[in-house]
Amino acid sequence: MRHLLDDPLPDGVYDPAEAAIVRYAQKSTRLEPIDDATYGDLARHFTTQQIMDICLTVGLSNMVNRFHATFQTDLDAATVEAVEAGDAIAGACAIPRPKPPGG
């Protein structure tokens, strides 16, 4: 998780298929055009159906995240605990989360 915002991606963190997905997700999330090189990188590792699934997953995640960011939805205690436990294992999440109201 800590390298999802890195551009370019560091060597040795992701295998080539994972790196293709992360680079696609970065561009898609930033609303950048998906160029032939990005699509070609996905196509070297995945079928058209799998690329469609990746596109749907990234798009759906972005939609849900934007909804929560707009309405600043609260997280239940169990979710916060799980995220913080994951952060402790990974060191820290590089993607900033909004601060809770009054927090």
Image: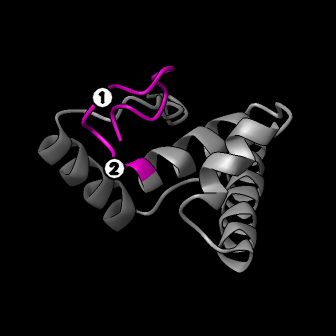
Question: Is residue 9 at least partly visible in the picture?
Answer: yes
Residue 37 occupies quadrant: top right
Q: Residues within 10 Å of mark 2 (few under 14, many from 20)?
A: few
Task: Locate the N terminus by quadrant.
Answer: top left
SS at badge 1: loop
Identified at 30% across, 28% down, the residue is 11
Residue 33 occupies quadrant: top right
Residue most extreme to the bottom: 49
Residue 6 horizontal/vertical position (percent) = 45, 23
Write down the residue under mark 2. Answer: 15
Q: Is residue 31 left or right of residue 73?
A: right
Identified at 56% across, 53% down, the residue is 74
Residue 9 horizontal/vertical position (percent) = 42, 27
Write down the residue under mark 1. Answer: 11
Q: Amino acid at mark 2?
A: Asp
SS at badge 2: loop
Residue 17 occupies quadrant: bottom left
Residue most extreme to the top: 7
Q: CA distance from mark 1 to mark 2?
A: 9 Å
Question: Is residue 69 at least partly visible in the picture?
Answer: no
Q: Residues within 10 Å of mark 1 (few under 14, many from 20)?
A: few
Residue 23 horizontal/vertical position (percent) = 58, 38
Identified at 24% across, 43% down, the residue is 87
For the residues labelled 1 and 2, say whether their Cβ atoms are less than 8 Å apart: no
Task: Locate the C terminus by quadrant.
Answer: top left
Q: Is residue 51 left or right of residue 21?
A: right
Q: Magenta segment range?
A: 1-16
**Of 57 and 49, which appears nearest the observer?**
49
Q: Amino acid at mark 1?
A: Asp
